[in-house]
Structures are given as C-alpha cells and as structure tokens.
Amino acid sequence: MSTFLNKGKKGEKEMSFLEHLEELRWHIIRSILAIVIFMIIAFIFKGFIFDNIILAPKNPAFLTNRILCEIGERWNTTALCINTKTLNLINIKMSGQLTTHITVSMVVGLILAFPVILWEFWQFFKPALRDNEAKYAKGAVTAASLLFFTGVLFGFFMLAPLSIHFLSSYEISQDVVNQINVRSYIGTLTSICLATGLVFELPIIAFFLTKIGVVTPTFMRTYRKHAIVIIFIISAIITPPDVFSQTLVAIPLLILYEVSILISGRVMRQKEKERSEFMNDGKSETATS
C-alpha cells in the first residue's frame, strides 16, 4: 500500500497524510459511536439481557442443559445432565452490581457493533484497493461478521454451560463451599464467548495472509500436524480442563482450518490468474509497439 491512499479512481485528487489521519479519525469516531449506541440499548434492556441471556446458561431450563439431560436419560447416563441445580451468585461490593451492569453493557455493545467496526475500517482501506480486491474485501467483511457471531453463539450455547457446570461443581474438599461472585461468573462467560468469536475468524486470517503472500495452501498442508497441536492448545486455554470440552472446541476449529486451506488455494489461483493476465497484456502491448 502506498503512503497516500489513492482516493481518485475517477480523477479525484490524492489525499495528503493529514487528510488520511482526519478520515481515519472519523471512521474511529463512528465505530465508537456505534459501540456507545449499542451499549446504551443494552444498558436500558437490563432485565432481558441478564435474566434471559447472561444468567441463562447456569439454569437447568437453559436449552443446552435440557437437551444434554434428555440425551443422558435416553442413554441411561447421568453424566450428561449438567447444571441440574440453579447456581446462586453473590455480590460482595457495594457498587458491584452497578459496575457489572456497565461492564456487561460495554461488552454487549462491542459484540453488536463488531460488523459496524469492520465496515468502517473496510471503508477506510477500500480506496487503496483495486476493484476486484475491493469486491473480495467486502465479502470478507460479511464473512468475518458471520464467523464472529457464529463463534460467539457456539461459545454461549456449547462451551459456557459445560464450563459453568465444571468450574462451579469442582471442589478440592467438602469443607470448602463454592460461593461464586457474579463478576467472576460474567468474566468467565464473556471470555469464552469473545475467545470463540475471535478464533472462528481463522478463514479470514488465512485469506488476508495469503493475499499478502505470508502463507500458501502448500504451507498450511505441510504444517497441518503442527496446526492440530496448536488448535488443541487453544482449545485447552479457552475451555475447562476436560477432554470433552476441548474436543468440542477442537472439532470446529479443525474444520475451519481445512476451510482456510481451500480459501488460501482459491486466493492463490486468483493471484496466478491476475499474474497471467498481466503478463499477456504486457506481451500484447510489446507486440503492438
């Protein structure tokens, strides 16, 4: 990318460095404004967000808990019945519930504004891209948003109930009683959802790394075994230390890795096609002159 992004695809003048900084500032301001707007909405709908979303995975009536328990009853195993007792949370600070309310509103605002943030940054870099690159980048913004929300939902419906059950029921001694702080509970839930949302961006990362020539499909196939180890390490970091949860995270990540190889291969074929067309155009111009 050149020092000054070319804003003039149809004869418009190039922008100076300070003009670019000014434009970037407005994109950042609009992104922050989107976060603030969604944050205010989340703050207003406190009851719905806390009772029906944030606190739902710990309750026996939560969708995942009910489905797993029904499967466990059919298979005559109680191991799948998780969160059968409602987990009571405590608050130990005078302003704890208020600050928790504000923090959760900020996280919800950030998650909901994620597509807007991607769109704003894409709008900033769009003028520096060729028409075909801009088309692919626009598609990447949509795909990145969908993958992020898919990852968040996966973490919320699959990993969060398992993590809550494991961590809240684990004990080192019967003399030690678990009294879970509400901020600890929410911190665990949000870290799981945000982490899975980000790791689900693997195909988008592979797309851009291939575009700039950092990785190739051959490279990704050669180091597939190393990638599998890294995926299981990441799964172990964002899940409780049990094999079932780690495998549950690793499986979709392995699938996304294979999808990333296909995407990388498609990008390489497109680059080869563009290079071939460029060479043919150069030969045609030479022959004509």
Image (cartoon, helix red, strand yellow):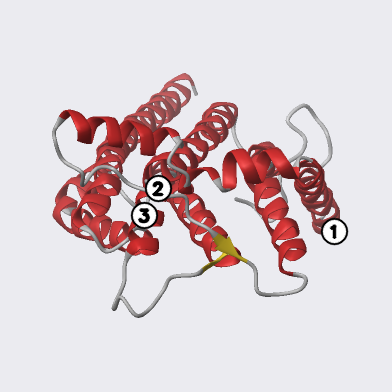
Report if the CB atoms under discs 3 and 2 are less than 8 Å apart.
Answer: yes
The span from disc 1 to disc 3 (Cα, nearest Å) is 53 Å
Label 1 packing within 10 angstroms: few (<14), some (14-19), many (20+) = few
Q: Amino acid at mark 2?
A: Pro
Q: Is residue 39 left or right of residue 141?
A: right
Report if the CB atoms under discs 2 and 1 are less than 8 Å apart.
Answer: no
Q: Amino acid at mark 3?
A: His
**225, 274: nearer the viewer:** 225
Q: Amino acid at mark 1?
A: Leu
Label 3 packing within 10 angstroms: few (<14), some (14-19), many (20+) = many
Q: Is residue 265 above or below residue 159?
A: above
Image-quadrant location for residue 142: top right
Which secondary structure, mark 1? helix
Q: How many marks?
A: 3
Q: Which mark is residue 18?
A: 1
**121, 93: nearer the viewer:** 93
The span from disc 3 to disc 2 (Cα, nearest Å) is 6 Å
Image-quadrant location for residue 111: top right
Q: Nearer the viewer, mark 2 or mark 1?
A: 2
Q: Is residue 80 visible in this depiction of the protein?
A: yes
Q: Is residue 162 left or right of residue 148?
A: left
**Would you name the residue on which mark 2 appears?**
161
Identify the mark nearer the N-term, 1 or 3: 1
Residue found at x 76% / y 47%:
39
Residue found at x 50% / y 32%:
143
Residue 108, position as x, y percentages in the image: 66, 47
Identify the mark nearer the N-term, 2 or 1: 1
Q: Which mark is residue 222?
A: none
Residue found at x 77% / y 62%:
98
Label 2 packing within 10 angstroms: few (<14), some (14-19), many (20+) = many
The span from disc 2 to disc 1 (Cα, nearest Å) is 49 Å
**Would you name the residue on which mark 3 appears?**
165
